[in-house]
Amino acid sequence: MTDRIEIPTRMLVHALVREDGTVDADELYTVANTLGMSDQQVRLCVKRLVAEGRFTHEGRGRKAQLHATADTMRALSPNADFLRHAFEQDAGRAPWDGVWHLAAFAVPESERTARDSLRETLVHLGGAPLQGGLYVCANAWEPYVEEAAHRLGAHGGLTLLTTTDLRRGEIREPAELARRLWPLPEIADRYHRLGRLARPRLDRLTGPAGLSPSALLTIAVELAAELTRAMEPDPLLPPELLPRPWPGTQARELVARCWTALRERDGGETRPALFRLYADITRARAEEPAEAG
């Protein structure tokens, strides 16, 4: 018996959005039931999403269809760049150039909402705070930072710079700086969990037993949810700055193999946009060996 993955109902609805923006209600209820969710739980979630203007609703019961609004589709589109970059790092094709990327901002108290949003964005993009209003990242994040600052109306208060000579107190060795600046043990624990959950699902996918379309879709939803939980707080530090072996590399390899097996079992049926994206990105990784420890 595999461990159950807790998936919020809203995340399930989002995960099942197809490339044309629709969600099939029968598929939604079937997968929800498999995951231990009640029909009432799903109905309430759908009602909230429609009330918030994130979806429109057509039809009744299991014959209904949800339609994601344009804003919802934009918000749900995962940033494929980060997942691709992670696999490039895992394969040893993205060596670190030794450059630290810094962003500083000065946003007045009167624009506190924009300031807080920019701070959250910098952390989401892999930044770590050095001191008030100053964040550092090991990857070239400038296009993403500038896009967020423009969107929040804070670009005029943004300063960007790079350096190869970063020190904090007496610490200047890059790997030690990374260990002090980012919560690497917590991030590693999330990947250990992802690996533990992916392995039995890979066994099911590669075993002789048949799996129904709803079972395949359930596994895909579970993997997508757990991969998201692991990767969202991950700054995707270059391998040169991480402990070896790094569990993120091993966990993502397992997920890539799961997606390859899902694609083979699926028989080419149309699946939610999120899974098609993951399958495309992970295909190359699944076909090559992982980097040694």
Image (cartoon, rainbow, N blue to C red):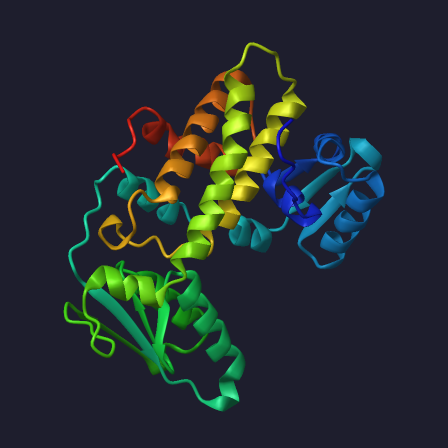
118 versus 174 height, above or below:
below
In the rendered image, residue 21, in percent from the top left (x then y), is placed at: 60, 41
Residue in front for this viewpoint, 252 or 277: 252
Q: Is residue 150 left or right of residue 50?
A: left
Residue in front for this viewpoint, 90 or 145: 90
Residue in the picture at 51% in, 36% down:
196
Q: In which quarter of the image is residue 60?
A: top right
129 versus 107 height, above or below:
above
Quadrant (top left, top right, bottom left, bottom right) of the C terminus: top left
In the rendered image, residue 270, in percent from the top left (x then y), is placed at: 55, 25
Q: In which quarter of the image is residue 90?
A: top left
Q: In this view, does 150 lie to the left or right of 61?
A: left
Q: In this view, does 92 lie to the left or right of 218?
A: left
193 versus 280 height, above or below:
below
In the rendered image, residue 16, in percent from the top left (x then y), is placed at: 62, 38
Residue in the picture at 51% in, 32% down:
198
In the rendered image, residue 115, in percent from the top left (x then y), is placed at: 47, 79
- Is any part of residue 77 visible from this angle? no
- Is any part of residue 165 visible from this angle? yes
Residue in front for this viewpoint, 261 or 26: 261
Residue in the picture at 20% in, 77% down:
170
Residue in the picture at 29% in, 32% down:
290
Quadrant (top left, top right, bottom left, bottom right) of the N terminus: top right
